[in-house]
Amino acid sequence: MKFFNAEQIYAADKFTIKKQQISSNELMERAAVQIFNWLHLRMQGAQVKIHLFCGIGNNGGDGMALARHLKEHGYNITVNVVNYSEKRSKDFLINLDRLKDRKIWPNFLERDCEFEEIGRDDIIVDAIFGIGLNRTPDSWVTKLIQHLNDSGAFILSVDLPSGVFMDKAIENTQAVIKANHVLSFQAPKLIFFLPETGIYSNQWEVLDIGLDPEHLAGLETEFELIGKNELLPVYIPREKFSHKGNYGHALIIGGSYGKIGAVSLASKAAMAIGSGLVTAYVPKCGYVPIQTALPEVMVITDKDENHIQDITFDIAPTVIGLGVGMGVAQETSEAFSSFLDSVKSPLVIDADGLNLLSKKKDLLKKLTPKTILTPHPKELKRLIGEWKDDFDKLKKAKAFSKKYDVILVLKGAHTITVYENHGYVNNTGNPGMATAGSGDVLTGVITGLLAQGYEPLDAAVFGVYLHGRAGDIALEQTGYQALTASKIIEAIGLAFIDLFKMPEEPVPQEESNEAQS
Ligand SMILES: NC(=O)C1=CN([C@@H]2O[C@H](COP(=O)(O)OP(=O)(O)OC[C@H]3O[C@@H](n4cnc5c(N)ncnc54)[C@H](OP(=O)(O)O)[C@@H]3O)[C@@H](O)[C@H]2O)[C@@H](O)CC1
Ligand SMILES: Nc1ncnc2c1ncn2[C@@H]1O[C@H](COP(=O)(O)OP(=O)(O)O)[C@@H](O)[C@H]1O
Ligand SMILES: [K+]
């Protein structure tokens, strides 16, 4: 699913209005009816106080139209116009008049005015700013936003939480609505998935307002949300007469004294994801533990007992995953450097492999084209330097990807895989996965997919999805706290099965069309 920017949404509005021969106000009405239906289905006429706060643009217009439907269905509402500008939009004004026609008189909130009391059990509809926000709200609007956030009431935001920009970082965190639920029109928004802005959208849902699907499908976007629909076409089925040689040989290089478990996890994950053969390359101290723990995995040992000092082997792996638990000893660094001089196979580099690259940036030029790097935020900082905010991080990651021809897997709650100018946002996984070794599992998963012939970008995006899905499935048995990296590996098979089990959930839409009657 694509993430559109504000300009694309405005253009899609225009296109739809023309093609469907409707007015912009009719489109607004659709949006308002959808929100009304969403609320009505849940509230069933309950007399909970609903406080609507509407700006003077089209986001406010949506709120005014919603107020009319709520009133007509007997809900207990108060309507507030947050009068932050004189430049009221045409459709806001139409809906203001329609309210007045029905004898509903909004309170006009201005600088220095008193704000109404809001009870903890009340509901707030936030329609102050939408995608048109282009500067930080004034101090009095900021105070109002704090008043709403402090009320403890349930906040339903229209389209996005007021105060969040579509394409840049928040400047004043006090000036942002903390929404309990966001109803986003037509498509989700990238800001829901970035850590600095995502915290303001506790939950979100998409409401279809009927923008022209063909027009939307033809739009080029920088970011997209990855789900089953995007991945099923990528899946490589198993052929009846295939043999293990068809599914590649993954070599996992890493480990050091006390950190052999990282290689065990990555190797086991590479096996579980379907690699035909898996070999682990470890210092001597890793031989017995891996041979004992993983009968399916072959082991090659380094000449040294405790650290990797010389990466040479006489096998021909299809793909190499390097770095987990490897340490950054001087000898390891030198071995890594000479290994890169001759390596030709596709590479996945994680953990200490990334730290070594950060220490000697020259090595980046030696990487196989489209090498996959899987940094967590600290490793990423070492690689690409500090960033100002999430948007700056993505910009820097894209530039880095282009400069070195690498695929960057930016791990986090919503891992984003970046290649050149594009970002693929993951929507599986859970906070239970914030646990030792879960990153090692991801390294094995991606390496194992590459071994089977997936293109590097597909292997990264698919691997991140399956890893998260396995974490979600494991969670059902363990709960957050007891979820461990090993449990993620155990659930990989179910993550594959789940891919085919049921179609992707449709974008949530409300069935009831009561308000249209
Ligand atoms: N296809 C869709 O998705 C549909 C979307 N719809 C709805 O339209 C919403 C977008 O509406 P919108 O363009 O009128 O912008 P909105 O956010 O209401 O802001 C209003 C104006 O405020 C101004 N302004 C900006 N920052 C400011 C500040 N800090 N302090 C003071 N003023 C500030 C700025 O004007 P400026 O002053 O810069 O000229 C801006 O234009 C969208 O989110 C959705 O709810 C549906 O109705 C139909 C289909
Ligand atoms: N809150 C979270 N929600 C979803 N996934 C998470 C969360 N926290 C961590 N993860 C995932 O867990 C993995 C952690 O990787 P990493 O930090 O390298 O762990 P380790 O070094 O212990 O193996 C990443 O794939 C990351 O996306
Ligand atoms: K809003």
Image (tube, rainbow, N blue to C red):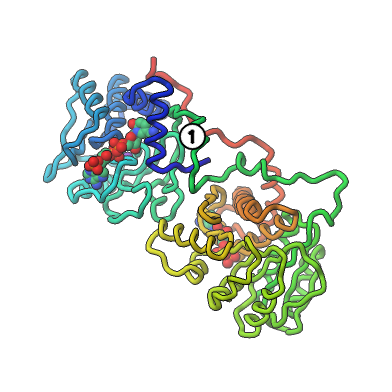
Q: In this view, does 51 lie to the left or right of 305?
A: left
Instruction: Tell me, yes or no, if residue 122 can be seen here.
Output: no
**Does mark 1 have its CB less than 8 Å from ligand 1?**
no
Residue 343 picture location, percent across and down: 71, 71
Closest to the observer, 413 or 476: 413
Vertical order, 205 against 259 (above or below): above
Q: Which residue is identified by label 1?
A: 216
Q: In this view, does 262 lie to the left or right of 222?
A: right
Quarter of the rendered structure image containing ligand 2: bottom right
Toward the left, the furthest residue is 112
Disc 1 is placed on an element classified as helix
- Residue at the (34%, 24%) spot, across then down: 29
- Residue at the (55%, 78%) spot, across then down: 360
Q: In which quarter of the image is residue 318?
A: bottom right
Residue 295 picture location, percent across and down: 82, 65
- For the C terminus, the image quarter is top left
